[in-house]
Image: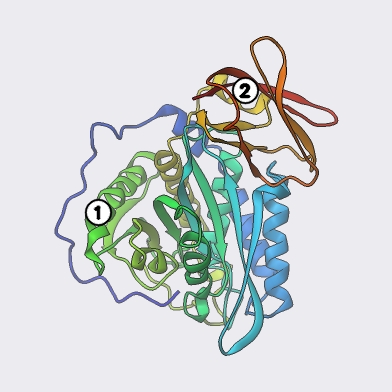
Amino acid sequence: MKAKLPIVLVVLFSITTSFSQQYIPGYATVVNQTTQANITARLTEFQNLGVKRRGTTALQNTLNWLKTAYLSYGYTASQMVEDSYTYSGSTAICKNLILTKVGTVYPNRYVIICGHYDTIAGTGTNDNGSGTAIILEIARLLQNIPTEYSIKFINFSGEEDGLRGSQHYVNNVVNATTPKMDIKVVFNLDEVGGVAGETNDTITCDVDESTPTSNNAASVVVTNELATCVDLYSPLNTWINFAAATDYIPFENNGEIITGFYETNISSHPHTSSDTLANMDVVYCYNVGKAAIGAAMHFAVANTAVLDNELFNAGNQVSFFPNPAKGFLNINKGNLTDSSYTFSIVDIHGKTVLSQHYDVSSLIEILNVSSLNTGVYLGVLETENQRITKKIIIE
């Protein structure tokens, strides 16, 4: 990340907690499941992977490390997509990694939690192993918790080369989706490791103050919410400052609502060989992680009720949406590891009225149901070893 200018101005609006944003004990329970050991271990692993420059083996090895981590948390290969790209002036193939967790109420509206994993001139343990470690911890803790909104965990490459990965994603995925991808908020984490030997007790919350101005007011709202989450779920103080040159900028320029975390004591080590664990404050990084986990649950509206979680996971997080459906039905295979399955729709008399087999299924398949009459049906997803059923309403 390009370094921010020193903070010299107080932003002229206050942080207030809205009546709808209160301390949620269930959120705190999840937040407290993170540990200093988890954060430190991921930072150490990231550092040991070396200098992650475009086109290097180290960058590819880091991508593989990320995928292995997500799989170890219970996500599946179907939930991950490699977004490959090249750009003028370089022959290197760069890759973004996108992990999608489908929401239970608003599956087509996304909370994007992102940060870059490429580095220059060093291992980049702070810039941006710190953000990467926290993103992994958020994904680990939310894997088995239903969220109303879908989450896309995105690990960008090419940030150090001029936000290449995030710009490619906005141009070729966000804007190329029909209809355009519906993004609730972009929450970016970059360089949140603090400075060894200093008192690191404040996290900077980034707010959009640039053009286009149409999304600035909404960014103020979500940044105030982010700051409130820091207060509710971590021991840190907050400072609000302008958004700088990191991976939320292409989204901001696209009219999306952005916010993010950045360290308040700004380290002099990023982009050098001394950007290492020894020059960070790992306790600070851990505390930033706690705040980020609380914020992720707030933005995505997590349901931490134990009973709901048990029901959510009993069906491998499989869902059929929209429900009621009209014309088309989306089949979300959740964390099923089976590559093939058969999906059937059964009417109230027990007759199968529609059936489709998928040999190599994607995370989400789209089924045309326009031929079905209005009514209540049963959706049945069958693999070789499992049978999952849910009620479906066709309008």
Residue 346 position in % (x across, y down): 68, 19
- State the residue lying farthest toward the left: 12
Q: Are marks 1 and 2 in contact (CB under 8 Å)?
A: no
Residue 387 position in % (x across, y down): 76, 24
- Residue type at mark 1: give it: Val
Q: What residue do we see at 34% from left, 71% from top?
A: 244
Disc 1 and disc 2: Cα gap in Å? Answer: 36 Å
Q: Nearer the viewer, residue 200 or 245?
A: 245
Q: Is residue 8 left or right of residue 150?
A: left
Q: Nearer the viewer, residue 359 or 147?
A: 359
Which comes before the other along the chain, label 1 or label 2? 1
Residue 322 position in % (x across, y down): 51, 33
Label 1: state its secondary structure.
helix
- Residue type at mark 2: give it: Glu
Q: Which residue is mark 1?
A: 220
Where is the N terminus found, in terms of image quarters?
bottom left
Q: Nearer the viewer, residue 192 or 81?
A: 81
Q: What label sits on residue 187 in the rendered view?
A: none
